[in-house]
Image (cartoon, rainbow, N blue to C red):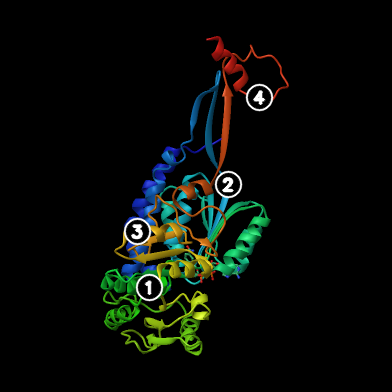
Amino acid sequence: MRTVSHVYHQYQCITERSLIANHSSELADLIVSEHGKVKSDAAGEVARGLEVVEYACGIAQLMKGEFTESASTGVNVHSIRQPLGVVAGITPFNFPVMVPMWMFPLAIATGNTFVLKPSEKDPSASMLLAELVAKAGVPNGVFNVVHGDRVAVDTILTHPDIAAVSFVGSTAIARHVYETAAREGKRVQALGGAKNHMVVLPDADLAEAAAAAVSAGFGSAGERCMAASVLVAVGGCGDELVERIRERVNGLRLGPGTDPTSEMGPLVTSEHRDKVASYLGIGESEGAKITIDGRDHDISGDPGGYWLGPCLIDNVTEDMKVYTDEIFGPVLSLVRVDKLDDAIGLIERNGYGNGAAIFTGDGAAAQRFETDVKAGMVGVNVAIPVPVAYYSFGGWSNSLFGDLHVYGPDGVRFYTKGKTVTSRWHNIAQHHASLNFPSSTATDRAKAQER
Ligand code: NAD
């Protein structure tokens, strides 16, 4: 029996929305202090998360089932959706507010209780989120935060009381989460890593495309799952793109996230910075050319910070590690191809299928790209095509294990079970016992013929 009404959930979502909005600057400060991204970027992350809470404010509409009157004589059919019980979310370091907010607003609004296991690298924002959710009137035990690393994750994956797991992180862990939780009989959506290609056709506005490549490649120091990490220059537009990107990158200000003039902050840890920087040497040894070397970029912050400026590696080919690995830092690989079909083929063979974008002035080419490209989220003259909250977010291939994407309509479906009710309330007494398979057609057709 559902004991909590949709109106109650809607009211809580509305209160949650205003509390989180009123504390968005505090949340952004926590992100900056632990993740390192610049404050404006952190504020943008909170705003995108809030959009999901706004979507959840319409939960009564989202949970509405279907109704068929007189499916057969005197028989009505309706469908309802019910919560799963206890569900869990395991989230990565790169969006410590937005990714949990992809999950818990809909998980709770649909009637579940939620256990969040945030990244151990930047766990504080999740505590403030929990306080705000509690202040919004969500009862104790409905939104829970568990800190830890793989031990906590494996406990969640095998816990008999947890019905479903949402995961966002790297591909290797996503696969482990999917396989383990599915084996335990849980519903799973496990979003993995990415290698997003931004394709530029020669007819595109190259100034605009270069600006977009810089924002999408180096924003948040490239630590975004929807960052552009491969730039595909089609039909000889590569040289002009490189020069335009260089001009923009030269003026980029690297500094601490707390400095409002900084455009790009440090990487999350020294180990991660070293790993990302090591790809420059790997690329060179594989025969690629370091055209922009971020190790030389001016830095306005603490020289001991985990810095790496924007890097562009040119002449990258499909067999190189810099192309096949997710680097997850401010490193853009440039691949040059002759035709649009070559770019589409490259993306298909890459193995990841999170986002893909095309920059062009040719509508027919854009249409072909959106139809043929093997990726879950596609941008046309939009470099980071993260869907708005009333669509759903998710990639293909190694970027998503499971069937349903996160948030939006898929989020509602993921956190609920469907039930279909067939009911008859009159003429019950007139029906004699029959062992035939129940069917509306024979009786109803006969009655229709009599009329
Ligand atoms: P990660 O995979 O290292 O960690 C993600 C979560 O898994 C964390 O909570 C962590 O504690 C846990 N974890 C780590 N190692 C584990 C193990 N061995 N066993 C069980 N759990 C483990 O990812 P990250 O470095 O925090 O985040 C960056 C990655 O996340 C990138 O690959 C990025 O592409 C991906 N990401 C994907 C999306 C998407 O929507 N597809 C969004 C954001 C980030």
Q: Ligand 1: does it lie within 8 Å of the C-beta at label 2?
A: no
Foreground residue among 327 and 162: 327
- Mark closer to the chain start, 2 or 3: 2
The part of the image, by quadrant, that contains residue 199 is bottom left
Mark 2: give few (<14), some (14-19) or many (20+) Cα within 10 Å: some
Q: CA distance from mark 1 to mark 4?
A: 61 Å
Residue matched to label 1: 234
Foreground residue among 196 and 258: 196
Residue matched to label 3: 364
Q: Ligand 1: does it lie within 8 Å of the C-beta at label 1?
A: no
The part of the image, by quadrant, that contains residue 243 is bottom left
Relative to 166, residue 327 above or below: below
Q: Amino acid at mark 2?
A: Gly
From this viewpoint, is residue 386 visible? no
Q: Amino acid at mark 3?
A: Ala
Camera-near label (2 vs 4) is: 4
Q: CA distance from mark 2 to mark 4?
A: 33 Å
Residue matched to label 2: 85
Q: Amino acid at mark 1?
A: Val
Residue matched to label 4: 438
